Amino acid sequence: MIKTVFNELIIGYPSSKKITLQIEEPIPCLLTDSVMIKQVITNIISNSLKFTSNKDDAKITAGYYYENDENIFYIKDNGVGFDMKFSENLFKMFHRMHSVDEFEGSGIGLALVKKIIMKLGGRVWITGEVGKGVCVYFTLKNDNILK
Ligand SMILES: Nc1ncnc2c1ncn2[C@@H]1O[C@H](COP(=O)(O)OP(=O)(O)OP(=O)(O)O)[C@@H](O)[C@H]1O
Ligand SMILES: [Mg+2]
């Protein structure tokens, strides 16, 4: 699904631009609402594409690990990033760290990600560094992982 969403979203980007998706295998299969999860992945990857748009060599990496009894999924990029000092509101509606002149958007994508992940009983957080990129993490319950 990550590859499908990526391939759908890069339609329209100039083919001269280098954008790579790297999947750090293995990522487990999920037993959960696929429409909701697709929305989560779409919102995160569309941010990664948007905020790497002025990079010549954009890179998006997705992976999974199990730590402290949690299934943690992550999607990271090497885009413009942001200052962590001001990041606590990013999952609230209409909160943005970049102006519309720089990057278009209304600040809805991550709020919806949080709503969906909370509904599924997981948690979500984001880390970023100016000029280096961002990593979005979310967790899902063991019941949602196909073992
Ligand atoms: N990958 C990223 N790199 C840099 N900043 C990000 C990234 N993802 C999110 N942000 C910051 O978090 C803000 C909120 O993200 P969110 O997806 O909710 O809104 P948006 O992308 O601005 O608008 P919308 O999703 O409604 O089109 C962004 O405006 C940006 O400042
Ligand atoms: Mg967005």
Image (spheres, rainbow, N blue to C red):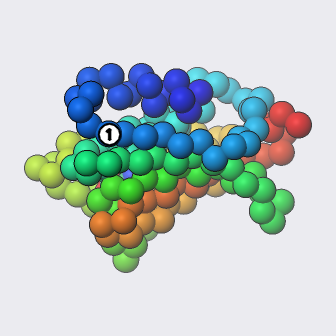
Query: Residue 90 in the image: x percent, y percent?
Result: 39, 58
Residue at the extreme left: 101
Q: Residues within 10 Å of mark 1 (few under 14, many from 20)?
A: few
| Front residue of this view, candidates 6 and 82 | 6
Would you say residue 93 is visible in this rendering? no
Quadrant of the image containing the C terminus: top right
Q: Secondary structure at mark 1?
A: strand
| Front residue of this view, candidates 7 and 122 | 7
Q: Locate residue 124 relative to residue 100 in the image: left or right.
A: right
Query: Residue 27 in the image: x percent, y percent?
Result: 71, 41
Query: Residue 80 in the image: x percent, y percent?
Result: 29, 59
- Residue at left offset 33%, top offset 22%: 11
Q: Locate residue 4 relative to residue 122 in the image: left or right.
A: left
Identify residue for label 1: 18
Q: Quadrant of residue 79?
A: bottom left
Q: Is residue 139 above or below residue 31?
A: below
Mark 1, ligand 1, within 8 Å: the answer is: no
Amino acid type, residue under disc 1 in the picture = Lys
Residue at the extreme right: 147
Query: Residue 35 in the image: x percent, y percent?
Result: 58, 23
- Residue at left offset 34%, top offset 62%: 81
